[in-house]
Image (cartoon, coloured by chain):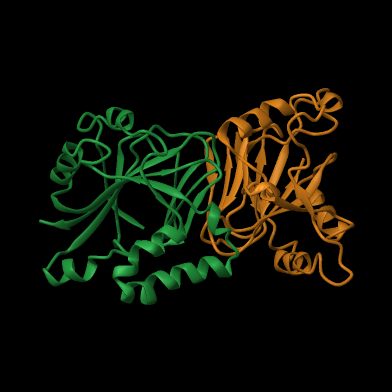
Amino acid sequence: MSKRKFSTHTLIDWDAVLKQIVPKTGDFNTPVTVMDRVTDNPDLKTTYYNGIMDTWKKANYDFANIQWYDYYPGEHFDISVQEKFAELVNAEPRRVFVSEVWPGHCVPYHWDVEDKEEEWLANGDKLVRWVCFMDKAKFGHVFILEDECFYNIEQHMTYEWNSYRDYHAGTNAGNEPYYLFHFLGAEK
Amino acid sequence: MIKYVGNTNAIINWDQVIAGLEKCGHETHPGPFYGPKHKAGDPIPQLKEVTDIWTDAGYHRVEDGGTVQWDMFFPGTHFDQSIVDKFVEHYNIEKYSSVWISRIWPGHFAPIHWDVNDMEEELAKYPDRLRWHCHIGKPTFGHVLIVEDQVFYNQQQGDVFQWDSRKYWHAGTNCGLTPKYLFNIW
């Protein structure tokens, strides 16, 4: 369930950010690439990632079709957006990215395992997570957060998650790519 | 417009219906039919409206390595006709052309479409034909139905909605962990 919400209307020009993102050029993710990337942190692999992958396997997901792209500030789009957003939610950025899900694909039921979570918590971070509907509402673009389903959400609407570990999913049954801005930060 | 018209749990045991459908394809029980029934290029009026969108958006059927597929169960073959009889009596539905239960497995899609029918030319004579859908499974994470600009999520088992037109654009998808069932009639 989400907590606070606000609109970034007149505060962030998301259409300009979307113009900077070149489709299908971000970090490509599938269950295989995700698991490959955590080889330097085997504890996380055995404790958390395997659990999520097992639920997907049991549900008979075709792993080849679980795929999405991630885009990072400073690499794929201007970092000033991250700074502006951090100011708006009064938090220090920890992991910020834009997700891109193409029609016919979904990122199923999961929570976001963070490689540096223990380090952040040990440093006293109070982690908060926000999602922003950075694109205009389009048919088939669905985001689910615990028991809440977000559909036809006005561009700019921004929601705080109840917990950064909330289970969520994104799916696209429409005909255009689906973009969301995600912000994980430490409360100031 | 789509409006809520009531709940059918008092007249139909949907858990029992689903339990019956889960047996389909096993032992002597006939298996479901698979959608989509039509493909691009089939000579059906207005089908191109849908298939062009799917082609341009890059959708592929499961058999071609994609995610487009759903199961269809029909009365008399996969579940008892009495279920339909109770439903139409309860909602005073005098005439209907098509009735089925759809099932979407996790990771599969019935992407943006309206239900183009083999008899579309004949059906054009009845432009005001209504449609109803019923959420026959319990509310479950990831089970999504979209009709026009509305999403149906976490609806109570047995909830029924009436569509003003059978030709509304809609989509079904499942990013959860269990199959999603929906009763459809128009």
Residue A163 image point, x, y percent: 29, 62
- Camera sees residue B98: yes
**Which shade of the palette goes to chain A?**
green
Q: In which image quadrant can residue B20 be found?
A: bottom right
Q: Colour of chain B?
A: orange
From this view, report whether residue A188 is shown above or below residue B168: below
Q: Quadrant of the C terminus of chain A?
A: bottom left
In this view, the residue in front, A32 or B132, is A32
Q: Quadrant of residue B121?
A: top right
Q: Quadrant of the N terminus of chain A?
A: bottom left
Residue B170 sits above or below residue B141 on the image: above
Identified at 73% across, 65% down, the residue is: B18
Question: In this orientation, which residue lies closer to the viewer: A54 or B156?
Answer: A54
Give me the residue at 37% from left, 76% from top: A47
Q: Is residue A78 above or below residue A41?
A: above
**Residue sitting at x 75%, y 61%:** B11
Q: Position of residue B90 (x, y in %)?
A: 77, 51
